[in-house]
Image: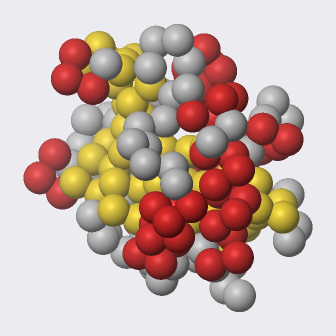
Amino acid sequence: MEKMLQTQRLYLRNFRMEDAALIYAYRNDRRCYAYQRWEDTSMRAIQAFVAAFGADIFLSGKEEQHYAICAGEALAGDLACFYTEKDNCITLGITIAPEYQRKGYGFELLQAVTEALRQRYPGMDIVALIEPENRASIGLFEKLGFVRECYAEQVASYVYVMEGSAGNPDLPV
């Protein structure tokens, strides 16, 4: 099992098929699904998701990537990265399982992820799309230094951005 990125309490790894049951559990928990955009959270759909993204390579530039967030051997959530070269941005999405919420895990992981993205893709903006009712995520991304740019009607979300060096002269190119 390769750890792609590690923090003090967490690490990213590829999904394994045995993760499907836990992903199914938290993706169907109202505390998680309220702000998710998954249309099908059936076990079959989750297993297909795990199979489709189980070999992603962190920071590879692949258009859509997904990773397991682990606390020790336990699955604590998942991370999505959407690389869009034409828009010069990487969009992040994170789901933390209910038993790991409100304990600093999201901040810890996203802080390390944004630092890794800054090193690998310094000129790209890092973006998060957050529904207005999702106060916890708004607070999390603002604490990380993301700035609300606008409200995007087409996705019914605020657009939060951490500018890359192309838009921020204080960052190295």
Q: Nearer the viewer, residue 123 or 129?
A: 129
Is residue 97 positioned above or below 46 on the image? Answer: above
State how many labels appear. Answer: 0
Q: How is the image coloured?
A: secondary structure
The residue drawn where x is 47% and y is 54% is 80
Give coordinates of residue 4: x percent, y percent: 62, 75
Q: Residue at image x 27%, y 26%?
A: 155
Residue drawn at 41 percent across, 75 percent down = 52
Mark yes or no: residue 76 visible.
yes
**Between 138 and 50, the one nearer to me in the picture:** 50
Q: Is residue 25 left or right of residue 95?
A: right
Front residue (pair 113, 24)? 24
Quadrant housing the N terminus = bottom right
Q: Position of residue 74 (x, y in %)?
A: 84, 64
Side of 7 relative to 73 (left or right): left
User: In percent of the image, x 29 and y 14: which residue is there?
Assistant: 151
In the rendered image, is residue 117 in sight? Answer: no
Q: Position of residue 75 (x, y in %)?
A: 76, 61
- Is residue 3 found left or right of 88 in the rendered image? right
x then y, percent, for residue 42? 52, 54
* Residue 49 located left or right of residue 24: left
- Asked if 149 appears above or below 105 in the picture, the reply is above
Residue 47, above or below 123: below
Q: Residue furthest bottom?
A: 1
Q: Residue furthest left?
A: 86
Which quadrant: the C terminus? bottom left
